Amino acid sequence: MTIDTTHAPKAPLWTRLPVVHQLRQSVGLQRGMLVVGLVLTGIFILTAIFAPLLAPYGYSQLRDDSGPFGAQQEPGGDHLLGTTVGGYDVLSRVIWGSQTAITVMVIAVVLSIFAGVALGLVSGYFGGWLDRVLVVVCDAVYAFPALLLAIVMGIVISGGRSGLWGGIFAAAISITVVFIPQYFRVIRAETVRIKAEAYVESARVLGASNGRIMFRHVLRNATRTLPLIFTLNASEALLTLAGLGFIGFGIEPSSAAEWGYDLNKSLSDVTSGIWWTSLFPGLAIVLVVLGITLVGESLNDLADPRLRSRRAPGKTAGIVAATSVIPGGTLAGGPGGIDGLEAGLPAHDQHVNDDPFEAK
Amino acid sequence: MSAQSLPDVVRIDNLNVTFATDGGAVKAVDGVSLRVAPGEVLAIVGESGSGKTVTAKTILGLLPETATAHGAVILSSKDGSNSNDVLSVSKQKLRQLRGTDVSMVFQEPSTALNPVFTVGWQIAEGIRAHGEFSRKEARAKAIEILGRVGIPDPESRVDYYPHQFSGGQKQRVVIAMALVLDPGLIVADEPTTALDVTVQAEILDLLRRCRDEFGTAIVLITHNMGVVADLADRVVVMYEGKVVEEAPAQDLFSNPKHEYTKRLLGSVPRVGHGTVRATARLQARECDWVNQTPVVVANNLKIQYPGRLGKPGFTAVDGVSFSIRPGEVLGLVGESGSGKTTIGRAMGGLTKVTGGSLTVLGHEMNGFRERAFKKVRSDIGFVFQDPASSFNPLLTIAECVAEPLVVHGRAANTRAARKRVDELLEAVQLPKAFGDRYPHELSGGQRQRASLARGLALEPSLLIADEPTSALDVSVQAKVLELFAEIQAEFGFAALFISHDLAVVDILADRIAVLYKGKLVEEGTGAEVLGAPKDPYTQRLLASLPVPDPATQALRRDELRLLRAAR
């Protein structure tokens, strides 16, 4: 491409990255929400990555050199957050649990996003009987409770035994089944809308193939609302995993750490005044879901110009934007007036303060 | 005016309005001062973005949250008993003022009315919001006002829903809603832009009656200089947020002082200007031109949209026959719903032909198959109505213009097509550098040029232009039309030019075809159709078109009245 000399210098690359761009754009409460969400999510991801370094003990460790940990130890000393009824270190279990959680999220999102988007695109673009069948199927899937499905999946995948991957896939696949229809619906609705836009018609008039229109013109314009469902999907995956663990279909403590399982085991502790075994895994679940949801919510608000808040302008702030793109007004440029056009700058970085006709 | 003793209904002093946008603060109105006397029609004209709508909305306190206004907008009631500064009164007081002191007529009547309530209910709603009225009294008032704005049989039609009215009647209902509390001022934001030209004439008559019978002052916002000439007493010209000229209508049209006003008036298309050019072009053609094989032949063309189950379909085009010879521009004129866009879409293979015959470049469109037509497509260019939506917002202009070249295998990819794209952009007088911009970074006129460049990329022998200038400001429109004419002369393609504006078609077309309710009522050269129209509909269409000259327009108004009476 030729280098555009009349163009204002583009902002540095890092400020145009998806989340960074929105962060810079936001103000006030929206910025606060986004920052809180990003910090929570960031801590979660870093914890998952560096779990082996951060955790003082292994997730299934019951004893160290000085002997067994002992059950239901109060926080303090060797065990910062105490130990569970089974004798595990609570802090280590919470830290290792983040690894399991993030695995489920990644698998669930990857499995559902591609299938859902592809189906939605094809269904919305071509319409007809295929569209009708897919819509009915998706409506039917909505009627399925995700947790029930996850239990069935758990039995199918691992025969009810709760190994690491059996538990992870049970949660991930049940989430996939429930979330494919959501991606499908959103993408299909956007596709149907975009299909009627003039630029798609103009591509059809040119004789562009269906594949080209779908992927070059429709798909990229239809992905606007994906971040929101993406984050919903991730937090739902985590909740299902925790739910499975809580009702006893979780992953055995010997194969991985999992917050829902720990909550289940701490049920009886609550009545006997042992708060630390239930508080910390529960807090971990709440904070991660909250963080991800906040990010999704604020990205969604920022993407919509009607919901986006802006800094209030000062009393006499602002300059009259040159609404005419050609200096001296639209009447000056144009046919025979290309000189005026070549020197012209785009509307948003050019400001005319003086009367353009004064000189004449 | 009539009552010198009364204060101005609205006086705006040094108004500044600033919007908070993503790109920082933008000033839309910059130190505007104006006043409107009782019973006066003040027109505010200017191109889009000149601040005219923002100024008018400030009078009603209807600015969005992102806007901050400074200055004074003093609104007085009709009898002059009290005055308020709209910018500083409480929200509650502002609500009282709206409707009683000032009200608004919107551009699009079909969106200004709530579709789930009867019009009577909606009018009564406004009445009951401003004082104690029983249901019966409010209804009686609604019936009375509907009658006064010219809705026939108001007693029964008060219970109709908005969709049961035609577009012009809907606008009458909107005006009735504005008038019902007898405000001193009506702000009319482009009240006739969404309407057909024959309906526009009727609504302008009604607005004139508002002033004469109700004594209401009107702030008329418009970009149509013909409408201004027809209705306005005084004109304010705005440009980039400032008032550049203010004068009585007669003076402004006969003796514009500011450079911008002069150019604005100069760019208004007038019927009859194109006839000379068309004659010159005709003489320049070879003598056997008439006998050449036409590019497009329509023979008793019928296009029907399928109806709902059990209901007959809607016939959009009914037995239309015409032909376009090589290098000829056919102007297709008609009101909304006349089927003109349908014909254009059928020629581009976007709508199915259901009867008769339509041959495009030797290819029969009745029984259309996409595969067989694909080769022909490279010989057809299409320019869409709305430049804002006809470009993929995620592709640069260069990528958009290269699309046809890539699709038809003339270039391997966008980069390889870049040289040709640059040539095309220069042909439509856009700088090469614009190729790297995104569509939203261009103005409407520039986008429409780029759209033209895309249409011309494959050097088609036929170009279909569907209302290419109707979304543009009049000043921009003039330039785009001029460019179109230049390029047509240079490339020599045949063209179907679709428009609702006779004056626009006149500038470009060799021949003009007039459509009315799916039927072709008149066809001929510009001189024939515009000079001596035979069909009564064409006569009415021509007479309804307001001309930008108050004195002439007053005469034409009387002619139109006679024509309507004769019908």
Image (cartoon, coloured by chain):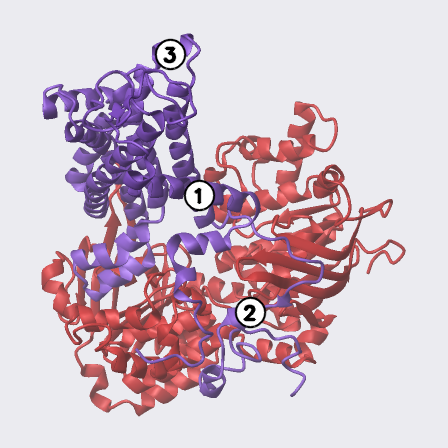
Chain colours: A purple, B red
**In the rendered image, which residue does mark 3 sit on?**
A269
Give me the residue at 41% from left, 8% from top. Answer: A272
Position of the C terminus of chain A, as image quadrant, is bottom right
**Mark 3 or 2 closer to N-term?**
3
**In the rendered image, which residue does mark 1 sit on?**
A39
Disc tally is 3
The amino acid type found where label 3 is placed reads Asp
Q: Is residue B529 visible?
A: no
Chain identifier of the residue bearing label 1 in the image: A
Note whether A338 is above or below A205 in the view shown.
below
Give me the residue at 41% from left, 19% from top. Answer: A74
Q: Are marks 3 and 2 on the same chain?
A: yes
Of circles 3 and 2, which is in front?
3
Q: Are marks 1 and 2 on the same chain?
A: yes
Q: Would you identify the image quadrant in which residue A144 lies?
A: top left
**B432 relative to A130 in the view: left or right:** right
**In the rendered image, which residue does mark 2 sit on?**
A323
Position of the N terminus of chain A, as image quadrant, is bottom left
The amino acid type found where label 2 is placed reads Thr
Residue A30: image x %, image y %? 52, 44
Inter-mark Cα distance, 3 to 1: 31 Å
Could you say which is closer to the camera, residue B52 or residue B154? Answer: B52
| Helix, strand or loop for disc 2 | loop
